[in-house]
Image (cartoon, rainbow, N blue to C red):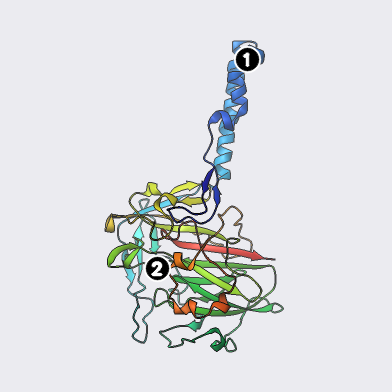
Amino acid sequence: MINVSRRDRTGIRNVESYPPRLQERSELCPVTRNVTQGGDHTMRTAISVVRNFALAMIGCVAMIAGDANAQGAVQRFVTQGRAKTVVDNLYKCPVKVGNHRVSAVGQIMATDGTVITVPAETAFQSGAALKGADLFNECNQLTPEKSADVSTAKVPIVEIDPDGEVITGFIVADNYFELYVNGKLVAVDAIPYTPFNSVIVKFKAKRPITYAFKLVDWEEHLGLGMELFGGNPWHPGDGGLIARFSDGTVTDSSWKAQSFYIAPLNTPGEVVERGNVHDTTPLGRVHPYAKKPNCQDRCYAVHYAVPANWAGPAFDDSKWPRAYEYTDEDIGVTNLPAYTRYPELFEGARWIWTVNLVFDNLVIARKTVR
């Protein structure tokens, strides 16, 4: 087993045991170990040794194949270099702000010919009208000073179940989110990239309730997972989600979280599939410990297909890795007014993401509340 320590120089904070690699054949298939080690006491003749060893090897092959299937063999798609821009900007801030970045969308062809949209296919691009109500939004000049100044009275209610309870939620995503409840779209982020904003949602639903987020760490270099930061135009970005709902649900490590777009990479081999974990922990998980690839516009990315029914309650996420919790310092939001002005609204919630806050750019997070 590969254990991740509670805290080390890579910035790792949580304990996680990844699914083991396939073991040696003799460990996976004790019958073959017995056949080859039993000696005269186990096998009386050379013919029976050959016959039983052949039968054991057939069983061993089947066992290895079954183990690989149990670990969730997945198909990866590999791309290299910059994507072609297909949308120049999804959102233009109507007023001048200090940190407005262009939310462009691109397409890039993988080595097998598959065309992939980066950083992600989103409901925002598709024209979804359900923009989340503003908690804090500089572009709309709505910036309450404190929690007591926030009103949810005029937030529209999205009906999932007519006989459900009305639930209010507060959300901050770095950078973009889509929230689905029991498979129905409740809200998309009002600003895909920056300036950073926060959102209020309301919906009516009854238990069990499946919360499902599509989360995107947007990028300036399309297909490469990098942006300008600290004077470095080729700096890997990072993500993050925090949310609290009035039914008592909060983001924490009880959620499931899976990655679907990983970049920037010097080589595709830097992503290792360990069961259903797309492992990049040797690259470092948080800034400033994470490595800064020097491949620039020659960097690689590894992508995985997003399941068609990922938002629905029937989707089986039982084999997905759990979410990881991160601190305000890890996310870099200690001075972010869209979040820090409202500690009461996010009380008890934790920032979450996958195992790698830096290199995982497209993430789905899910939790079912019963």
In this rendered view, identify the residue nearer to me: 331 or 112. 331
Query: Of helix, strand and loop, which one carries label 2?
Result: loop
Residue 48 got which mark? Answer: 1
Q: Position of residue 193 (x, y in %)?
A: 40, 73
Q: Amino acid at mark 1?
A: Ser
Residue at 32% x, 55% y: name it.
293
Q: Which residue is mark 2?
A: 218
Numbered circles on residues, count: 2
- Does residue 17 lie above or below 335 as drawn? above
Residue at 52% x, 53% y: name it.
6
Q: Position of residue 321 (x, y in %)?
A: 55, 54
Q: Is residue 252 visible?
A: yes
Q: Can you say which quadrant of the picture contains the C terminus?
A: bottom right
Residue 301 as seen in the image, left or right of residue 18: left
In this rendered view, identify the residue nearer to me: 97 or 206. 97
Q: Position of residue 361 (x, y in %)?
A: 43, 62
Q: Is residue 128 visible?
A: no
Query: Of helix, strand and loop, which one carries label 1?
Result: helix
- Does residue 104 lie above or below 109 as drawn? below
- Does residue 16 lie above or below 47 as drawn? below
Nearest to viewer (mark 2 / mark 1): 2
